[in-house]
Image: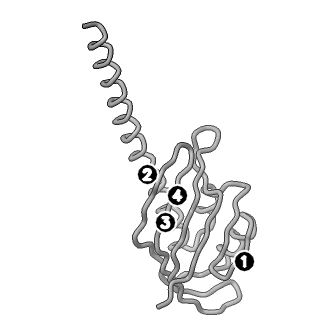
Amino acid sequence: MKKAWMWCLAGLLVLGNAGWLQAQSKGTEKAIADLEQEWLKGQKTNNADLIAPLIADNFWDTSSAGKLSSKTEMLAQAKGTKFESVDYEDLKVTVSGNAAIATGVFKAKGKDPSGESFDHVERFTDTWVKMGGGKWKCVASHQSSIKK
C-alpha cells in the first residue's frame, strides 16, 4: 500500500511539474513576443535607441542579402533607415530552456541610409538568450526574402 501511495505522489509531482513548466514556457513566449513588439516599435518610430537594449553585445545579424553585421553595425543601419511602414505577421515563439526562437514575417517600406527606396517582405528568425540577471537579449537575427 505504501508503494502505491509513493507512486501516486511521484506521478502527481511529475504532472504538477510538467504543468508548471508549461505555464512558465507560455509566460516566456509572451515575454519574447513583447520584446519583438518593442523592436517593432523602434522601427515604426525610427528610433534605434528603443532597439539597442534588446540586443546582446555579441549579436550578429544576417541580412537577406547575406551581409553579416555586428550590433554596432546593425544599430547604425537602423538609425539611418527611415520606415514609411513596417509590421510583423505570423509571429511565433518557441522556448527551450534559456533560449527562445522567434519567427515571423517582416513587411517594410521606406528608405535605407543611402536614400534608396525599399519594399521588403522577409521571413525572420531571432534567437533570444536569457542572460545574467534574467534579462532576455537577442543574440542573432536572420532574414530571408519572400518573393512577392
Amino acid type shown at disc 4 = Ile
* Label 1: few (<14), some (14–19) or many (≥20) C-alpha neighbours in 10 Å: few
Left or right: where does residue 75 sit relative to residue 37? right
Q: Which residue is mark 3?
A: 103
Q: CA distance from mark 3 to mark 4?
A: 7 Å
Residue 15 drawn above or below residue 64: above
As drawn, the label of residue 29 is 2
Judged from the image, the secondary structure of the residue bearing numbered disc 2 is helix
Q: Which circle, 2 or 4, is nearer the viewer?
A: 4
Q: Which residue is mark 4?
A: 101
Q: CA distance from mark 2 to mark 4?
A: 9 Å
Q: CA distance from mark 2 to mark 1?
A: 29 Å
Amino acid type shown at disc 1 = Lys
Q: Earlier in the sequence, mark 2 or mark 3?
A: 2
Q: Nearer the viewer, residue 71 or 82?
A: 71
Q: Nearer the viewer, residue 65 or 83?
A: 65
Image quarter of the N terminus: top left
Amino acid type shown at disc 3 = Thr
Amino acid type shown at disc 2 = Glu
Residue 64 drawn above or below residue 93: below
Q: Earlier in the sequence, mark 2 or mark 1?
A: 2
Judged from the image, the secondary structure of the residue bearing numbered disc 1 is loop
Q: Which residue is mark 1?
A: 67
Judged from the image, the secondary structure of the residue bearing numbered disc 3 is strand
As drawn, the label of residue 129 is none
Q: Earlier in the sequence, mark 2 or mark 4?
A: 2
Which residue occupies 67% across, 72% down? 62
